[in-house]
Amino acid sequence: MAGQRNSQAAGERIQSLVRELESVADPAIRQNAEELVRLLTEMYGAALGRILQLLNENEASKRVIDSLCKDDLIASLLVLHGLHPQNVETRIKNAIEHVLSHLSSQGGDVKLIKVEQAVAYLRMEGMRHDYFSSASPVRSTLKQAIEEAAPEIDEIEIEGLGPARLSPRENGIASSAIAKEEQREVRCELCGNAITDSHGHVAQIETRKLLCACRACCFLFRGNGTARGKYKTVPQKCLYLAESVMTTSQWNELQIPAGMAFFFFNSALNRTVACYPGPAGATESLLPLESWNNIVKAHPLIAELSPDVEALLVDNLKERKSPGCYVVPIDACYELVARLRRRWKGFDGGDEARRDIDAFLAGLRSRSEAAAQSQ
């Protein structure tokens, strides 16, 4: 417990120092500090990897590895650096076993059936269904144990009881707004520290999830290369382009069946994709490369978008006289997706959804800088 309190205190102190650093006027000092943190993180990540490699060379040392994996702080660092020797299924099974070991008087068992698309499917054996109802403290404890052991899991689904969302995420996005609505504490999904002020997001590149992150973790994962490139901080910069970057003909060539979409480079696919919001969330489609390349050539700013974390948002709805184009953080795009999904009614979304789009774009415009246009 003392070690846990010390690590939490250290995390809070790091966040305080990051806030002070962000207020430094000299950008060179801030850049040097960011590079220092990244290099130190890469160094201790490499050291952790080397320790595991040496332990694996000795059969007798594998017990030590098991002990390391049972330590919450060490295990979280191993997951963060992509070094955890246990796969996600093993970690979930161990978490279930740990919870059930404290419930021996109840009898029965919980089995992991499979893990698929960030959902862990479980089955109860010899236990009453109401024991794992949505209001059950046991189910809450099980959810928390799985979340800590396998942060890449979004939901658990217990056979016969339906899904239980682990974190306040929507369509792969960590939405702190949902946590606030439910009056739940918002925690950094990387280090676990409580977030007491406004916060940003960090993209998990392989799974394309956005994680709520404290200032310290956002600071840590700026740029590329940290933690083997697994994570990347979403920037906060917004730019407004006074003119549309594409003609109506080019828009039609992209085969997007909507009047609004966002475009970003997907590292996993190694190409640009387009997503458009709707009642089912964000629908993704691959772009015709020739058409997209022509647009990029005419507007070099698009080619400078940071992969995975920055997007081109195009508001090309027919009823709008002057289409708006923005360079935005990817979390802003999914915020729009989540808002429309909650407000959408009928075939065309309804008046409430349209008003929400107007409010969102007005807010986006107010915090955007003007971008220079290509001649």
Image (cartoon, grey):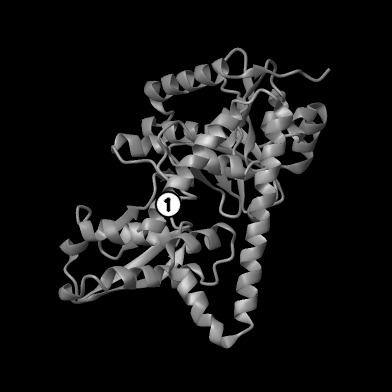
Q: Quadrant of the N terminus?
A: bottom left
Q: Secondary structure at mark 1?
A: helix
> Compared with residue 13, is residue 346 higher up or lower down, i.e. above or below?
above
Q: Residues within 10 Å of mark 1 (few under 14, many from 20)?
A: few
Residue 270 is at least partly visible in this image: yes
Name the residue furthest bottom. 59
Instruction: Give the residue at the far top of this rendering.
Output: 321
Q: Amino acid at mark 1?
A: Asn
Would you identify the image quadrant in which residue 99 lies? bottom left
Residue 176 appears in which quarter of the rendering?
Answer: top left
- Percent from the top left, x then y, of residue 204? 57, 50
From this view, report whether residue 155 is shown above or below residue 114.
above
Of 158 and 279, which appears nearest the observer?
A: 158
| Residue indicated by mark 1 | 6
Residue 169 in percent (x, y) is at 42, 45
Q: Position of residue 355 (x, y in %)?
A: 42, 19
At horizontal 25% and vertical 63% (from top left) the residue drawn is: 160
Q: Residue at x 62, y 71 (%)?
A: 51
Near-viewer residue (23 or 147): 23
Q: Residue 98 sits in which quadrant?
A: bottom left
x, y percentage for residue 30? 68, 32
Q: Does the rendering let one see residue 147?
A: no
Which quadrant is home to the C terminus? top right
Identity of the residue drawn at 60% across and 72% down: 52
Residue 371 falls left or right of residue 160: right
Q: Residue at x 29, y 38 (%)?
A: 182
81 left or right, relative to 39: left
Which of the pair 162/190 is nearer the observer?
190
